[in-house]
Image: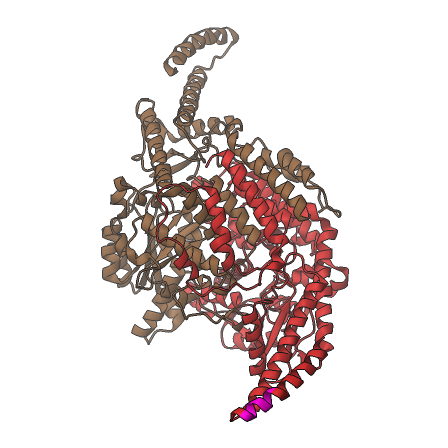
Chain colours: A red, B brown
Amino acid sequence: MDAKEFREFGKAAVDFVADYLENIRDHEVLPSVEPGYLLDLLPKDMPEEPEHWTEVLSDINRVIKPGITHWQSPNMHGYYPTSTSYPSIVGEMLASGFGIIGFSWICSPACTELEVVVMDWLAKFLKLPEHFQHASDGPGGGVIQGSASEAVLVAVLAAREQAVISCKETHPELSESEVRGKLIAYSSDQSNSCIEKAGVLAAMPIKLLPADDDLILRGNTLRKAIEDDVAAGLIPVICIATLGTTGTCAYDDIDSLADVCQALNVWLHVDAAYAGGGFALEECTELRRGLDRVDSLNFNLHKFMLVNFDCSAMWLKDANKVVDSFNVDRIYLKHKHEGQSQIPDFRHWQIPLGRRFRALKVWITFRTLGAEGLRSHVRKHIALAQQFEAFVRNDSRFEMVAPQALGLVCFRPRGDNEHTAQLLQRLMERKKIYMVKAEHAGRQFLRFAVCGMDAKPSDIEFAWTEIETQLTALLAEKSLAARKPSNVSELTQHFQMHLASDSGTHEKSQ
Amino acid sequence: MDAKEFREFGKAAVDFVADYLENIRDHEVLPSVEPGYLLDLLPKDMPEEPEHWTEVLSDINRVIKPGITHWQSPNMHGYYPTSTSYPSIVGEMLASGFGIIGFSWICSPACTELEVVVMDWLAKFLKLPEHFQHASDGPGGGVIQGSASEAVLVAVLAAREQAVISCKETHPELSESEVRGKLIAYSSDQSNSCIEKAGVLAAMPIKLLPADDDLILRGNTLRKAIEDDVAAGLIPVICIATLGTTGTCAYDDIDSLADVCQALNVWLHVDAAYAGGGFALEECTELRRGLDRVDSLNFNLHKFMLVNFDCSAMWLKDANKVVDSFNVDRIYLKHKHEGQSQIPDFRHWQIPLGRRFRALKVWITFRTLGAEGLRSHVRKHIALAQQFEAFVRNDSRFEMVAPQALGLVCFRPRGDNEHTAQLLQRLMERKKIYMVKAEHAGRQFLRFAVCGMDAKPSDIEFAWTEIETQLTALLAEKSLAARKPSNVSELTQHFQMHLASDSGTHEKSQ
């Protein structure tokens, strides 16, 4: 493919994306395919000869789009949002056009330095403590990781290595493997699965401490666990707190956790993958309480800042603790400016060596939306969640499970878990909206997350209508099943009753 | 930004990329900026109000492009190639337009299934053993990781967990931490820094065994190391061999390493990040010897398959060994097809939870280039390296340091290391071409890697002319310095001599 063809293909692809996103409500949010659908549609071998791009684009319509779950649709309510934006998509293309790998300053000064700039912009925008800025005097700063999982793993591994170094000094009688065998970390039983996985990968147990009844982890629980473990000869390393848990968007109590971590010399990391979006808002000031005392923090720009995945911001109070843990340089990676300036070599701040020019899409998105645009986006998600909450509270057949928080509403139809599961199954089969269920203390519930690139109040109304009419239908079916007739005349009589009852319900649901 | 503006911005960006890549030879490969250049050019805060995309695009020209190291330029010869391609750039944009996160099948069936398809296409194209295909009966298959670092880390961590499980069975008297304290892994002292880093991250020492004089690691060295370690009570876990070392593109002897690993029950991983491109060629059949007995393997598509970074293919002989090590599921990640089909949930095959739709750019690239296009690309790199090697061998002032291998030539000007360093420094200051130096056994040398999206014989000639004229100039300066005059009349005399000698040298260099 030459440049001329690329201009044609590229512009056709721009139109394809614009058409797709403009008309995204035309698609059922969930695809109607069965596992293996694509394996049957595509040839078993790469073509020997080149095919024209028009054939490929046509196949994207024919075989790929039918297998897409439409994350950018406002009818997506599963997981947390992954909102892309038009400027971010262009940024991704421009970055792949430059085609650089920015593992050190010399590999493209703009890549490293733009990351420094946008991470400082973001730190200020989110009103984070000043020591997280590169521009501050201290050893802190921000870096773009691929995902929250990687940010958490970086914190866990760096904390682990720092603990080993420090324990070998204070306990020279212990061998390194004895030290490693005593390390222990903490999080809440409400934390994301990536935290448990980080413990597996780091070969360091992470205790998932029971959150309080309101699903919040507090300092007293952590203190008790640490004291017990220290008494048993273990070495506490890190606590990973969450602002915006995956299940219910609960906010761990950073202030009291920081009290404990500071007193006992334990690294405190905050996974604010979702709730970090709230830091920017005056009305969410409470969310930032205690952040001045955390060692590291992550927030997914693809969740709330309209930057397409992957883009997970991470800040470190003392980046040297990561760099010193991970630096294994070779001569071919050195360059003459290395270590001579304030410009970080970000490869030492992350797991892999290579790094994409992610700062470009961030910069383009922030400039074309502006700070006010980003704040409006977060506020819109909150308002839409409040709209949904009002629908739930207004219908006595449903109950709230946790307070609405940012763009998330956790609710359930009153009754047993089976009832919740049946409602979700109906909704999944109809594919109009997509939610997932979660569970706490044996009680299953539904998570309604405001998602999509451009959700509107009418989308929330659409979702609510779908949910409540399906509950109505489910209740009607159950009532039918409960009175299952044993012969034909009873069946006839039953249907007459059911039709009457259904019509009544229908009126109510309007 | 609305869809209309996106269509304008996106199409302008397509033209920007096409213009940039068509005219990439107009740029000096290395930028002329000093550390901190961009921090001085950009505002300290995010703009409060949105800016128009035309301003942003104009700033990309004004402040970003001057800070780019032009990896797609044919004058880039540092590191290994990272060749993007026009179809791959479009693929990246389309993927960000869909804006999905494919961590499980239900999150977008097309994302998971297209990855299965292209990884099988690639396994066949590279003539890998059949058990690496998803379509085979066994538990093997391929997955796209972000980078070679991540692929190696996945192999190291999975091997570590498997070793712990197996040791706890055979040695129930040992505690888990005692087992972990005895684990040991192996690689060559020629392997990439990411392997040493994987050992740090995994908290498992990786011994960098001395390669033979030809920079190849062989089974006898590994066997001796393992036998010594076993005698000392350690537990050997994994050997990471390299096909195409970073320094000289040496190929470890997979066959003899596999003999040892099979006999001693050690995981054998092959990092073929670069040399994997040769697997596709009949004339490189030798490269694939022994691959039928390795447990896992990685190859960077961004190095040789014209897919833009990041895209690192990894194959596993038994993917269950990774899945069983990493699976920490939560209810909200479950879906009804989970575990019911042959379709993998790739989140268990990797470090992070989230995953981009990378298979799309791979599929688009493979289809628009065809198998023959990909093979031609690798062959072209080999031919260009051979062209460069001929230049080196034809000039007695230079010497080869290792055999030319694929697109890499390792050479040096005859003389001491200082001489090599001075030549490189001159070249770096002139910014016409970019190479990096490496070192083996105390001897520094230059790595000339064929890179860029579309390198041609004339580019190789350009590079060689630059190198040898700069050596000529360096030698002339040295000769001048050696005869540094002590007074004005001597200086005059010296310049007369130097002018005569310089003119002679000039003729020779033509």
* Foreground of the two, B238 or B204: B238
The reply, left or right, for residue B183 in relation to residue A412 is: left
Q: Is residue B124 above or below residue A433?
A: above
- Residue A490 sits inside the magenta stretch: yes
Q: Main secondary structure of the magenta part?
A: helix
Q: Residue at x 23, y 52 (%)?
A: B256
Residue occupying image coordinates x 57% and y 43%: A112
Query: In this rendering, does residue B146 appear at all?
Result: no
Furthest-right residue in view?
Answer: A282
Where is residue B86 drawn, in percent x and y?
49, 39
Q: Does residue B442 belong to the magenta stretch?
A: no
Q: Residue at x 66, y 60 (%)?
A: A276
Q: Answer left or right for B124 relative to B340.
A: left
Residue stretch in magenta? A489-495
Q: Position of residue B305 (x, y in %)?
A: 40, 43
Q: Is residue A301 above or below residue B83?
A: below
Above/below status of B508 relative to B94: above
- Foreground residue among A314 and A437: A437
| Left or right of A467 on screen, residue B200 | left
Number of labels in the image equals: 0
Which quarter of the figure has residue A299? bottom right
Compared with residue B298, is residue B470 higher up or lower down, i.e. above or below?
above
Query: Residue A152's quadrant in the figure?
Result: bottom right
Q: Position of residue A177 (x, y in %)?
A: 41, 65
**In front here: A48 or B74?**
A48
Query: In which image quadrant can residue B293 be found?
Result: bottom left
Q: Quadrant of the C terminus of chain B?
A: top left
Residue B125 placement (x, y as % from top left): 33, 48
